[in-house]
């Protein structure tokens, strides 16, 4: 009986999360991703041909961003269509 009650409570939590919070969480994640991409562009823009800050500072920050650099370059260089919103 306790397992069934726990399952019903878990389902109810999931439904309420979907009704009230999911859209806000997705919007927050998208905003955080956009801010991170902007930070990458400002600091590492010379990699894709858009120098914004001097290379000295970019190289100093490279150690902190080296893990995500390949993912960011793929995002910046990928082909887009005017119907892309995400």
Image (cartoon, rainbow, N blue to C red):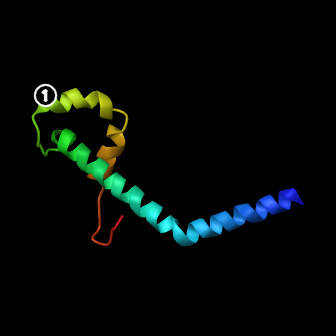
Secondary structure type for disc 1: helix
Q: Quadrant of residue 13?
A: bottom right
In the picture as drawn, the residue positioned furthest to the right comes out as 1
Mark 1 surroundings within 10 Å by alpha-carbon count, few (fewer than 14), some (14 through 19), many (20 or more) = few
Q: Locate the N terminus and report the quarter of the image it occupies.
A: bottom right
Look at 53% across and 70% down and name the residue there: 20
Q: Nearer the viewer, residue 28 or 65?
A: 28
Residue 13, placed above or below residue 63:
below
Q: Quadrant of residue 15?
A: bottom right
Residue 66, placed above or below residue 71:
above
Give percent across and percent down for residue 61.
Answer: 24, 31
The image shows a total of numbered marks equal to 1
Give percent across and percent down for residue 18.
Answer: 57, 68
What residue is disc 1 on?
Answer: 56
Look at 37% across and 34% down and name the residue there: 67
Q: Locate the C terminus and report the quarter of the image it occupies.
A: bottom left
Give percent across and percent down for residue 58.
Answer: 18, 33
Look at 21% across and 27% down and name the residue there: 60
Residue 56 shown left or right of residue 61 in the figure = left
Q: Nearer the viewer, residue 13 or 70?
A: 13
Q: Nearer the viewer, residue 57 or 86?
A: 57
Residue 9, placed above or below residue 60:
below
Look at 56% across and 72% down and name the residue there: 19
Give percent across and percent down for residue 48.
Answer: 19, 44
């Amino acid at each position: 009986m306790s397992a069934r009650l726990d399952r019903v409570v878990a389902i109810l939590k999931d439904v309420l999360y979907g009704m009230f919070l999911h859209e806000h969480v997705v919007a927050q994640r998208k905003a955080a991703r956009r801010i991170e991409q902007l930070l990458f562009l400002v600091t590492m823009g010379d990699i894709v041909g858009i120098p914004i800050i001097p290379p000295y500072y970019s190289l100093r920050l490279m150690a902190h961003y080296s893990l995500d650099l390949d993912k960011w370059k793929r995002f910046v260089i990928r082909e887009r269509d005017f119907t892309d919103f995400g």
